[in-house]
Image (cartoon, rainbow, N blue to C red):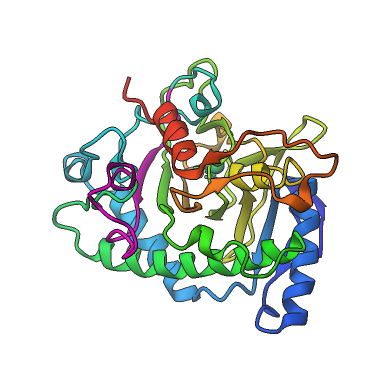
Amino acid sequence: MRCNRMEMGIMVPVVDMSGYASPGGRAAIARQVARAAQDIGFFTITGHGVPAALIEDMRAVSKAFFGLPAAQKATAHRRHPDHNRGFFPYGEVALAKSTGHATPPDRKEVFSMGLQRPPEDVDPSNPDAAIHFAPNYWPEGFPRMQEVWARYFDELLALADRLMRVFALALDLPEDFFVKRIDHSPSSLAAVDYFETSHAAQEQQLRAGAHTDYGTLTILLSENKPGGLQVRTRAGEWIDVLTVPDAFVINIGDLMQRWTNDKWLSNLHRVANPPADASGNSRRLSIVFFHNANFDALIECIPSCLDDGTAKYPPILAGEHRLEKFRRANRVS
Ligand SMILES: O=C(O)CCC(=O)C(=O)O
Ligand SMILES: [Fe+2]
């Protein structure tokens, strides 16, 4: 594992997953992940098995989407305020609101998708389930997007399953501990366009306000551009997180922090504004897979994490946590 301080920021620990197929390889990966999850809640993975050509296709088609005329993007606008689906134009997301901080909107546009159809063991007439498994919305006249996104979604869901097995090992649990808690999860995939703008940022306005992610883990594919990802250290300092081409940045989400009674860190992070002199070189595309637990999974302290016998959080349903956070951050104002 490497952890280098570099001029522009830090490399969070880099974990090579290429040994995943063997039990010994998984155990070695788990040891590195356990340390990173406790220290900073972020790490980078290489050797993850997602084909480079698919990553390239995903970047290209997502970039092309954001380049479509506004009226065409609007054909995919979400049709219900609780749906984490479709196009969110500038003005409709302020991630800091999910933590209770009222800020102006994030300086970005977002497109989001979820599972193509509800999982087989979920009754779609159950309203608690239906809200998490709404149909996807796609832009008119741009059919290629759906095909590439569906392939990428499937690959990333499979990668998240592998990571959740590693997480179980890292917590000294049976390797399949999380399997029945994530087998019909409302995970989602988003592309984020941090566009360039001549409008000055308002007070407390960032590309993405400080927040934690709501689910189990997040798999980020991004690029090093001025105005990038920053994470807050345990000492309270904001540091730039650099990405490695074709590697993913993984961060721990709220559910893992609750499951582990704060042993693992769902860390605050944000996306900074680019400096004015970076104009022309600061447009940044992020592709973010938000993995979640089953909407009806009860998240309560894992017994092995109950060090002094006290659980710091009351049990919570994963779906309720997701919906509450989503409603706060994505209110149309
Ligand atoms: O774009 C990034 O680097 C991070 C985005 C993020 O944290 C989020 O959308 O939750
Ligand atoms: Fe995030």
Residue 267 at x, y = what percent? 67, 39
Say if the magenta span includes residue 115. Answer: yes
The structure residue drawn at horizontal position 22% and vertical position 53%, both measured from the top left corner, is: 138
The structure residue drawn at horizontal position 47% and vertical position 41%, both measured from the top left corner, is: 280
Extreme residue toward the right, this view: 308
Q: Left of 232 or right of it: where is 128?
A: left
Q: Nearer the viewer, residue 10 or 85?
A: 85
Relative height, residue 71 to residue 294 (above, below): above
- Quarter of the rendering containing residue 307: top right
Classified by dominant secondary structure, the portion drawn in magenta counts as loop
Residue 185 at x, y = what percent? 44, 56
Q: Left of 57 or right of it: where is 236?
A: right
Residue 58 at x, y = what percent? 39, 64
Q: Which image quadrant: the N terminus?
A: bottom right
The structure residue drawn at horizontal position 20% and vertical position 38%, both measured from the top left corner, is: 79
Q: Which residues are magenta?
A: 105-131
- Quarter of the rendering containing residue 26: bottom right
Say if the magenta span includes residue 236. Answer: no
Count the numbered circles shown: 0
Q: Nearer the viewer, residue 286 or 93?
A: 93
Q: Which image quadrant: the C terminus?
A: top left
Relative height, residue 100 to residue 51 (above, below): above
Extreme residue toward the bottom, this view: 22
Q: Is residue 322 visible?
A: yes
Q: Nearer the viewer, residue 153 or 61?
A: 153
Relative height, residue 235 to residue 169 (above, below): above
Q: Is residue 107 visible?
A: no
Q: Nearer the viewer, residue 217 or 90?
A: 217
Residue 99 at x, y = what percent? 56, 26
